[in-house]
Structures are given as structure tokens and as C-alpha cells.
Amino acid sequence: MHIAPLSPHDPAELGGFELLGRIGQGGMGQVYLGESPGGEPAAIKVIKPSVVDSETRQRFAQEVEILKTIWGARIAALLDADAEADPPWLATEYIEGPDLSRHVARHGPLPSLLTASLGATLAEALATVHKQGLLHRDLKPANVLLGPNGPKIIDFGLAVFAESSVSLTAPNTVVGTPSCMPPEQARGDRPLTPAADVYALGAVMLFAVSGHLPYQAANINVLFHQVTDPDTAPDLSDVPEDLVPLLTAMLAHRAGDRPALAEVVRRCRSLIEAQGVKVAQARRRLTTHTAAPASEREVLLPTVLAPAPPAAPAGLPDTEPYAPPVATLVLPHEAPEPTPTRVDRPAQGPGSRAATPPAAPAAPASPAPDPDTDAVPEQAATPAPARSRSGQRLHSAQARITAQRLREVYAATASF
């Protein structure tokens, strides 16, 4: 993922988080890579001042309150937020890894075994969300981050409490990603049920194994017609034979015909075991397959410039060169932060006006590295926290890496 330098108009700090660079943006907001005073990396989502109004604040505050209630090993955690600030912001854990859409675009579709593992993992995560009385409502490839410890779901900006008919959406408007939403959501039906997330998970699994979504069209009205037409079947081309029955059921037009999430997990597990692999082994293979190779990490995050070598110990002969101990720096990978797409529901009937196509999703959000990426030889003593001459805290290793990379990007593009 590309981290752009901060612009002169960007804040240097929000809510105590130091901002290090830009990692994504959309029509509604900007996402920054930040760092807490204690060195915890975070994805900082900020609403653009130009779109801040009472409805936007209310929707953003709802997202914050929902994130406070969500827990789970496969859910990007909320770190802090202030919906009343100017501008409103929230911070979530930063996940090292690409989103599913970028991984497939770069490396191609996943094998059926790994797709089944992905489906089982995400189905369990969604089941945890549903137990807390919530629906995600915008699950899509860009909202699945492939981190070093497995996939995680991000961006609950459109989440609502299950069975709730309350909506901040304007009449005749649909909010979400049309190519991944179920027919009932595309029609604007209320209330939605957990079956809506089952459909979206089926679309994500279809994309993972084939590289395409259930429906595709250049015109938004045509796309909505395909999704809502019971006679237009989803495109299951290039899907391995063993996954066709499951994806057909998950993408059923009627919500009542789709399997429950527990059934999705069971059928994914059967597909994995039919290939002579245990579920835990399949998950490890998925993580290994989607992790960035070491050589790629070195390109994405160059090493920090080495400090001046220490003086040779007293008593060492001048003729013998002195080589100080070397600390190995383990470099992380990064992931973008997505932004949900809001589109107007196409008007029905003759003479209707075409809705504005949804903007392409911004590189997400949602992102969180492991807490410590410096591997130091055991014999090395732990140094005291470094401070600048002015007494301010110096950056952690992650911040130094990012700052150095931003300086190199600027140097490479500068005209002098």
C-alpha cells in the first residue's frame, strides 16, 4: 500500500495520535496512518470538513457507538474516537496486509481450499457480530484485510442493529456497494436480516475464487436490475466445481433460501476436510499464501538509516577493524482503508433518471501492525527511551520507518 506524505493542510495530530501519512480517502473522508503517544499504530478516519453536517455527524456517531459494542478476533478494534470534534474522527487498529480485492488483482484468485478457509473464518466473524445484535451491511472484498494473523473485517460504517427499521438514509436511497448487496437491500426493504450478510459473504467468496463479483455492469441502473431480477442468475463462471453448490445457496435470490452462517462454516469445513486437510492447517496456509514476502516488504518499507557506529572499545588495537553488533529490523506490510459507497437508488418506471454511479472504493481502512517489529540480539541491553533536545518523545521504530520512507518519496519526486 502506498502511504502519501501529509499535505500542508493536514493536521499533524488528532486526539493525541500523531499523523504520519495518508493511507486512503473517499468522498466522505480521509484516512491517515497515525501513532499513539505510546507507539501504537492506528488508522485514523476523519470526516472531511466540506461534508460535515448534522446528518453526517449523526451517522458517524452511530458508527462509533456500534464499534464500541463489537468484539472479536477477526474484527478491527476501535481504539478511540470523538464524533463531536471538529473534524470528527475515529481510530481503529492498523492491520498489516492488503485487502482482498488488491491481493486478487495482484496475485490472482485463491484456490478453492483457501477460499473455503476464508469463508469459514469470515462466517464465524460475522456470526459473532450477529450475536451482538448487529448486521455489517457492506461486506465486500475491500473490507476484508489479509493481515499477518489471518483475515479481518473492517468498516462498520453502515452497520445497523438487526431487526431495526430506523434508518438515516434518505427516502428512495440505497447505501452500500451494489455488486455485493443482496436483492432485498438493493430494493430498500426494511428490516434486513442476517441473511443479507450471508449473501455478501457469498459475493466475497465468489470474488476470492474467481476474480469477479456476482453481477457486473457499466450502468448503475442495469446493475440494480440484475441484482433485483429473480430471473437473472449470478455469474458463477470460473468457480471450482466443489464450491458451486455452496455459493449458489449463499447467493440465492430469496433470503429464506440462504444457509445460516453456522451451516456455511460446516460446509466450508467439509470442503476443506475432503481435500485431506485440517481446518487449522488450511487457515495457516491461507495466511502464508496472502502474507507479503520478505523481498516485497523491503521494497515497501526501506530500512531506517543506521546511526553512526560507536567508538571502538578501549584497548582494541588500531589495526583491527571494529564491527559493532547488528540489530535486525523486521519490516511490516501495510493495508489501505476502504470507504463505503453511497449510491442513489434508481427510480422505477419509464422516464426515470439514471442514478449517479458509485465512486470507486478508496484504498481502505481500516488498517494494524504487530506491536513490535524490532528484533534485537538477546545480549543487547534495552536502552532508555530516547528524547530530543527539546524534551519531546522521538518516534518509535514504526514511525521512524514511515518518516524515512516519506522523506525518500519526497526526495525522488522533488525538482531540485
Image (cartoon, rainbow, N blue to C red):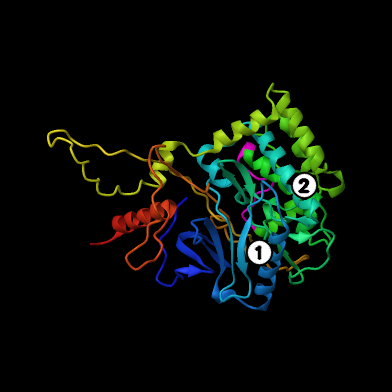
Callout 1 environment at 10 Å: few (<14), some (14 to 19), or many (20+)?
many
- Taking the image as drawn, is residue 346 in sight? no
Q: Nearer the viewer, residue 370 or 22?
A: 370
Circle 2: residue type: Ala
Q: Residue at position x 66%, y 38% from top? A: 118
Above or below 369: residue 42: below
Q: Nearer the viewer, residue 182 or 88?
A: 88
Give x and y (percent) for residue 276: 69, 21
Q: Residue 403 occupies which quadrant of the picture?
A: bottom left
Q: Nearer the viewer, residue 371 or 229?
A: 371
Above or below 176: residue 59: below
Callout 2 environment at 10 Å: few (<14), some (14 to 19), or many (20+)?
many
Q: Residue 415 occupies which quadrant of the picture?
A: bottom left
- The magenta segment: 209-219
Mark 2 element type: helix
Specify the principal SS of the magenta part: loop
Q: Residue at position x 72%, y 46% from top? A: 125
- Taking the image as drawn, is residue 218 in sight? yes
What whole-number distance in Å separates the C-alpha atoms at marks 1 and 2? Answer: 25 Å
Circle 1: residue type: Arg
Above or below 361: residue 314: above
- First in sequence, mark 1 or 2: give its number: 2
Q: Magenta stretch containing residue 218, yes or no?
A: yes
Q: Which residue is mark 1?
A: 342
Asked if disc 1 and disc 2 are in contact, CB closer than 8 Å, the reply is: no
Give x and y (percent) for residue 394: 39, 60
Q: Magenta stretch containing residue 21, yes or no?
A: no
Specify the farthest residue to the top: 276
Q: Return the mark for residue 127.
A: 2
Q: Residue 331 occupies which quadrant of the picture?
A: top left
Mark 1 element type: strand
